[in-house]
Amino acid sequence: MNAMDRFYARTLETMNELRQDEWGHVGTVGGWLGEALSKEGWLYVFGTGHSHLVAEEIFYRAGGLAHAVPMLDPRVMLHENAIEATYTERETGFAAQLMEKYPVQAGDVLIVVSNSGRNAVPIEMALLGREKGMRVAAILSRRQSDAWPSRHASGKKLADVAEVVLDNHGADGDAWLEMPGLPSKVGSTSSMMGLLLIQLILVQACENSLARGVAPEMYISSNTNGDDHNEKLLEKYRSRIRHL
């Protein structure tokens, strides 16, 4: 097989591993979120580096929840200073500064995404969420996490402090394919699997909320007939969601 075929096959294998091993965990987190939505609760998602893509996936999009908020800060993202972000995600105390900017409450759901699960900021974010009474889940790679020590002062990793861990079944080092002539492997699946896991959680949460008699507020595509519908949601939540 050529490189495309090999990577495609590896991606399908990873998806099948998620179906086999993570379905129960997805159902658990979907249950938390369904309950939260039925009680006017909220979903918050946080990730640093490329993991912030999973946080943005839930936000202000067609078919997405109005009660879904990404926790974003340019200092741990890649679009302004990628090199600085690598070191900022290791800083003690940063998570507390960021958490203060969001009106989180007990019973809300927090999903922390970190492929390695070893850096201080994601670990502290999960700990803070639990202190505030949130239900806290993690999306990470068990292979990567198990292979390297924590960078948090406690010595704990994200997998140690989250209530539920969803394994993206990624490789240690993220990339999968060996290719003669390259100094390292190429082709990563962590972002794809993170996006899949978060969407699975969202659809299951919607079903669970509906079973409780509550239809979650949703955005409709602005490229169809969604403008009027969405504008009402924006007017309702613009003062609460700092990224709108």
Image (cartoon, grey):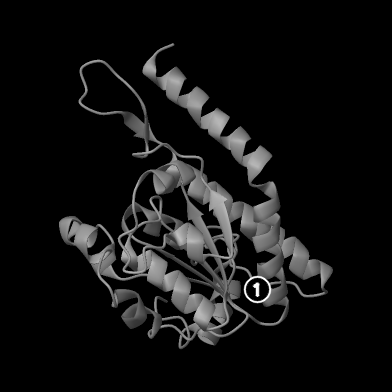
**Which residue is outermost to the front?**
155
Q: Is residue 193 left or right of residue 216?
A: left
Q: Is residue 80 left or right of residue 8?
A: left
Q: Is residue 15 left or right of residue 30?
A: left
Q: Residue at x 41, y 49 (%)?
A: 145
Q: Is residue 208 visible?
A: yes
Quarter of the picture containing the N terminus is top left
Q: Tell which of 4 and 226 is nearer to you.
A: 4
Which residue does the numbered mark 1 point to in the structure image?
Answer: 217
Quarter of the picture containing the C terminus is bottom left
Percent x, y for residue 25?
A: 65, 54
Q: Residue at x 42, y 72 (%)?
A: 125
Q: Is residue 234 visible?
A: no
Q: Residue at x 34, y 60 (%)?
A: 48
User: Which amino acid type is marked by label 1?
Assistant: Glu
Rendered image quadrant of residue 52: bottom left
- Quick check: 218 above or below 184? below
